[in-house]
Amino acid sequence: RRQSVSLLLCLCNLSVHTAMPATRRSPARERPSPSPQRRRSGVAKSAAAAPKQAAPSKLSLVDHVLLPLLLMVTTPTFCHITAWLTAQPEPTLSTLAAAAAAGPAALAADVLASTMPDAKAAVLLTAFSGLALLIYAIPGPVKFGPISDRGARPAYADNAMWHCVLFPLVFVLGAAAGLYPLSVLYDHFGATVGLLNFGGLAFCALLYAKGLSRLGLRPSGPDAGSSGKGLLFDYYWGTELYPQLGGVDVKRFVNCRISMTYWMLAGVSFAAASHSRHGRLDPGLVLCAASQFVYLVKFFYWEIGYMRSIDIITDRAGFYETWGCLVWVPSIYTLHTRSMVQLPSGLSWPPPRADLP
């Protein structure tokens, strides 16, 4: 009886599949083309069913003006506030609330003073970018990104692992040689954020003009021009997909060789700053720094894959993409490790075991 039931179920299943050829048809089989009369009726039905396109109204105002403007005002401000807050003896929301209650004007003045660019931050970022440029010039196998909508196919020298090894090595050796303390990224963080922020906003304006062939600049490829959604949105979204300056790919250099490298070394520098202040290595901070470092080693190993991702092949180089990597990543992605310099994690290292030699 059991065998009879199983056979009956198999036959029913077969009949169901054979009764549904339209949903199970192999892609290799061609469907018969509809007759002209049926095609005309289908077009008429589609036109009747399609909603009428609304004229630009509140939706375009929100998407193309209000939201970009909101982000371009609040995110730089937030980066400055967090840079100021994490330098306080108690980097907590209570400290921020108390300072705001004491007087918003005084708080704004303190935030600007603590994040004002200075000469030391300029030297730091110049040396940082210069070393990145030197390693960028190392030759490597040429890898290609996908072909863009307008036929551009970016080429990249696959030398990311050279950067991954050489940059941290030079950074640590420079500190060991006494050229600067290992905590240098923490020591000048506020001024660095200010310089990155103001410089990043100006740099996005330069890229905006370049993508529109202004100020004597020209786009680096065919994927450039206005989005047709207004000046504000063009500055926010960008006007060029693959900009280059002096033969250097802007997206790759900013996103990977500056942004991710700073994030990679920030944990190391912040752990050194914590050690100099408290006389011991904070296990929570050290483990956070180590996990970030390992994660970013993996990123550089996969860098060519990143250059084929949506960040690169879809997003243009504007405030959203370029300022975000240049300022938001160093400021906010390092927030947890930076806070632990003044406010240790409270964790402890495992005690030594007596039964071990």
Image (cartoon, rainbow, N blue to C red):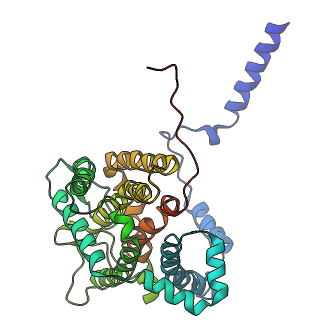
- Closest to the observer: 315 or 73? 73
For the C terminus, give its image quadrant. top left
**Residue 244: image location, x then y, percent:** 23, 71
Asked whether residue 52 is in view, the answer is no
**Residue 256: image location, x then y, percent:** 33, 59
> With 227 as the anchor, is 16 left or right in this view?
right
Asked whether residue 342 is in view, the answer is yes
For the N terminus, give its image quadrant. top right
Residue found 21% across the figure and 59% down from its top: 178
Residue found 33% across the figure and 81% down from its top: 199
- 2 over 236 or under it: above or below: above
- Closest to the observer: 235 or 295? 295
**Residue 268: image location, x then y, percent:** 38, 54
Residue found 61% across the figure and 61% down from its top: 38
Quarter of the view holding residue 273: bottom left
Q: Which residue is situated farthest in the bottom direction here?
A: 105
- Closest to the observer: 176 or 125? 176
Residue found 57% across the figure and 62% down from its top: 39
> With 215 as the anchor, is 189 left or right in this view?
right
Q: How many marks?
A: 0
Quarter of the view holding residue 187: bottom left
- Closest to the observer: 273 or 150? 273
**Residue 243: image location, x then y, percent:** 27, 72
> With 77 as the anchor, is 174 left or right in this view?
left
